[in-house]
């Protein structure tokens, strides 16, 4: 396992490299995670793949100095420093990393022949996220709420008492709103990634054209990113085939993933 950095403009991008296989796998971790989340892959596919796991801006050891914005052009710029421009590869993304992976695929679908998405963000538009990041007024209100969350927490507790939200969602939201430091991270990260917006219509066309192999994996007990989202998206994206030989374990499960084998 090697931990390295890339100089990108004024920033330093941290990434981890593992495995010695002839094929390339590029991984993007989830919200609040680090690149080490993919270290386990080397044990199972290290002979088949060389794995590059990039730490996203405002995560891990990456030092992002380009302001509160990370775009598709930035993503391509980092990729060009890491891999040769013509090199094909497989993509894997978890949660927020799934949205990053989908955004990258839109830009260079001809180079990506397989994609594994673990409980991916980006296949369904969240109304609150859209309001907080895609509108100026909404973003200002989002910033105000992160500074003074009292009113929001009161409504959250009320909704829980009235059983309008389940306990999983309550705990999830309370965790991100209850701490000043975590709230600050939430505002920064949501705002910085606001330009990475997968276009499902475009994705559907590209996947058909390039015959890209896709695999969607969801947690059986995940109450935040529901597996039904994936079922709907599979129809919308007109997925060509399931990935038949990739890795023998998903039970590592960053979100209680179902132990689905992806072997032949």
Image: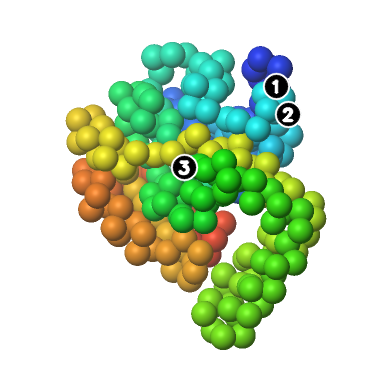
- Mark positioned earlier in the residue sequence (1 or 3): 1
Colour scheme of the picture: rainbow
Q: How many residues crowd around disc 1 within 10 Å: few (fewer than 14), some, or many (20 or more)? A: some
Tell me the quarter of the picture where residue 12 sits: top right
Drawn side of residue 62 relative to residue 223, left or right: right
Q: CA distance from mark 1 to mark 3?
A: 22 Å
Look at the numbered disc 2 and give the secondary structure of its residue: loop
Q: What residue lies at 40% left-to-right and 44% top-to-bottom?
A: 116
**Residue located farthest toward the bottom when viewing the structure as drawn:** 162
Callout 3: helix, strand or loop? Answer: helix
Q: How far from the left and from the top, in percent, is residue 199?
A: 34, 39
Q: List x then y, in percent, for residue 82.
A: 55, 19
Depth check: 143 or 35 in front? 143
Callout 3: few (<14), some (14-19), or many (20+) C-alpha neighbours within 10 Å? Answer: many
Q: Which residue position holds label 3?
A: 99
Q: Kindly identify which residue carries mark 2.
A: 63
User: Is 4 left or right of 119, judged from the image as shown?
Assistant: right
Relative to 217, does residue 29 appear above or below in the rendering? above
* 154 to the left or right of 226: right
Visible residue check, residue 146 = yes
Residue 30 visible in rendering: no
Q: Which disc, if any, is residue 11?
A: 1
Quick one: label 2 or label 1, which is nearer the N terminus? 1
Residue located at (57% from left, 73% from top) = 168
Instruction: Check if mark 1's residue and mark 3's residue have beta carbons within 8 Å.
Output: no
Q: In this view of the protein, which residue sits in the foreground, 249 or 47?
A: 249
- Residue at 64% across, 17% down: 8
Residue at 23% x, 53% y: name it: 235
From the viewer's perspective, is residue 38 above or below residue 169? above
Looking at the rendering, in which quadrant would you find the N terminus? top right
Is residue 131 depicted above or below 136 in this figure? below
């Amino acid at each position: 396992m090697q931990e390295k950095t890339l100089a990108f403009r004024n920033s330093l991008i941290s990434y981890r490299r593992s495995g010695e296989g002839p094929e390339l796998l590029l991984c993007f971790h989830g919200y609040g995670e680090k690149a080490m989340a993919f270290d386990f892959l080397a044990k199972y596919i290290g002979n088949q793949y060389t794995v590059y796991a990039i730490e996203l801006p405002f995560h891990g050891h990456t030092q992002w100095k380009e302001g509160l914005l990370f775009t598709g052009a930035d993503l391509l710029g980092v990729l060009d420093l890491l891999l040769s421009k013509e090199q094909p590869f497989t993509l894997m993304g978890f949660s927020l990393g799934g949205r990053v992976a989908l955004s990258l695929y839109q830009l260079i679908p001809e180079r990506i022949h397989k994609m594994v998405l673990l409980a991916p963000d980006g296949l369904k538009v969240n109304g609150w996220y859209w309001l907080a990041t895609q509108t100026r007024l909404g973003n200002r209100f989002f910033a105000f709420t992160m500074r003074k969350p009292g009113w929001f927490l009161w409504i959250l507790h009320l909704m829980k008492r009235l059983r309008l939200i389940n306990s999983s969602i309550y705990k999830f939201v309370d965790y991100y709103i209850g701490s000043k430091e975590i709230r600050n991270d939430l505002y920064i990260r949501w705002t910085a990634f606001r330009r990475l917006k997968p276009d499902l219509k475009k994705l559907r066309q590209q996947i058909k054209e390039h015959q890209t192999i896709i695999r969607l994996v969801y947690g059986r007990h995940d109450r935040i990113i529901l597996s039904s989202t994936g079922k709907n998206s599979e129809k919308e994206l007109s997925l060509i085939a399931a990935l038949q030989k990739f890795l023998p374990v998903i039970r590592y499960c960053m979100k209680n993933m179902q132990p689905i084998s992806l072997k032949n």
